[in-house]
Amino acid sequence: MPLDKYTDCNRKKCFLSMLFITAVFIIAFGWYGNKSIRSHYESLLRCSQKPSIATEDISTRDPLTVVAIGRMLYDKPQTFKPPRSDVLMVTPWLAPIIWNGSYNIDILNAQFHQRNVRVGITVFAIKKYTVFIKTFIETAEQFFMVGHKVNYYVFTDRANEISNFTLSEGRQLVILDVPSYKQWQEVSMRRMEMIRDYAYQRFYKEVDYLVCVDVDMRFNDFVGVEILSDVFGTLHPGFHNAQRGAFTYERRQQSTAYIPRDEGDFYYAGGYFGGTVEEVYKLTNFCHNAMMTDKNNSIEAVWHDESYLNKYFLYHKPTKILSPEYLWVNSMGVPQFLKRRRFLAVPKNHSAIRNKRALQKNPGYQKVEILKLL
Ligand code: UD2
């Protein structure tokens, strides 16, 4: 073959081989790139939804599914017309504070339905506090996360006192048998440890978010997905407008819950916090460990679990804050700014419900007796 022809032919061969190699490269790279982006998203999803301490349960959802809501008709947000001007709606670290009128629940419901979210609500009914469960669950069925999937996690030492409830579709009651403690303060504080342990062992497989609340409460108006975020706390109704110095933080430096007088954003209630399972795991783990450190040093923070929670939120700022609409006590009246009272304290006789002996004389009438005392 003449050299020129050879070269010509060689050029053609060379060109074709280059074309082939390039095509192979493009296909291989595209496949690999897609795979690595996918696994990157998968690991992100796992991190954001499950505690990193237990990652073997991989989400069945396709992480690349786009959450896009369909056509909806609603009023346009107005740049210079905030929906509320009478209350603080965002913190200096840009976490929204949830007030009535500040959100559109239809948009939020559409988003959360698309994500097929399941919410766990933890509640403790230890010893005599089982008396509060009926009202709690019945009102939750009426107002809590209506239309969404819900798991009620009832931690109790008296499972036989928890009656059967008729729940709406997609909602289930899970009774968790747990030990009780002698002092009511310890019962309250140990909730952190138990939530942490169940988050680690179980909750991450079953729910996306946890809402952790007191049992001596009743839902009085709708509480929906507007509260959900990575980690949220609730303004304590008694301190929503208080100055720093008035917050009942732990002020003794020997305690791990200590907060200096020149620090603090809000005073958060011990009876209402939550977030993703992973974030609730971190929060409860911190609080429980801090309590144990104090216990070993023979000190207990002034407001028990609430003091440790406030310490946590000072240095791990919540990503959303619930206004006192979400935790109110009727004895405080109904101020102008409070457009809704969504979750109300059930009045209780503290010493009767906490005191072991008060009702022991007549155990057969225990429930009736307690109800009379409330
Ligand atoms: C406040 C807080 C509470 C906790 C406590 C610490 C709110 C609404 N409440 O409530 O979360 O931080 O201060 O001092 O912010 N429990 C039992 N059995 C018992 C005792 C307690 O099940 O024998 C559970 C029950 O779920 C109860 C919770 O622990 O709701 C807190 O106890 P509490 O309601 O008596 O405490 P309280 O009203 O001082």
Image (tube, grey):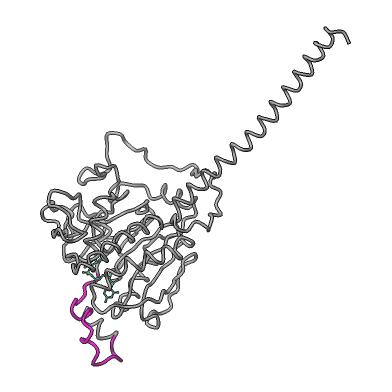
Q: Which of the image's four quarters has the N terminus?
A: top right
Whether residue 182 is situated above or below residue 76 in the rendered picture = below
Q: Residue at x 30, y 80 (%)?
A: 127
Q: Which of 165/357 is in front?
A: 357
Horizontal and vertical percent for residue 232?
A: 32, 54
Q: Which residue is drawn at 34% across and 47% down?
A: 103
Q: Residue at x 53, y 54 (%)?
A: 59
Q: Does the magenta stretch include residue 245?
A: no
Question: Residue 193 sits in which quadrant?
Answer: bottom left
Horizontal and vertical percent for residue 180?
A: 31, 78
Horizontal and vertical percent for residue 86?
A: 20, 45
Q: Give the range drawn in magenta.
A: 346-366
Q: Which of the image's four quarters has the C terminus?
A: bottom left
Whether residue 299 is situated above or below residue 77 in the rendered picture = below
Horizontal and vertical percent for residue 156?
A: 36, 76
Q: Is residue 349 magenta?
A: yes
Q: Which of 284/358 is in front?
A: 284
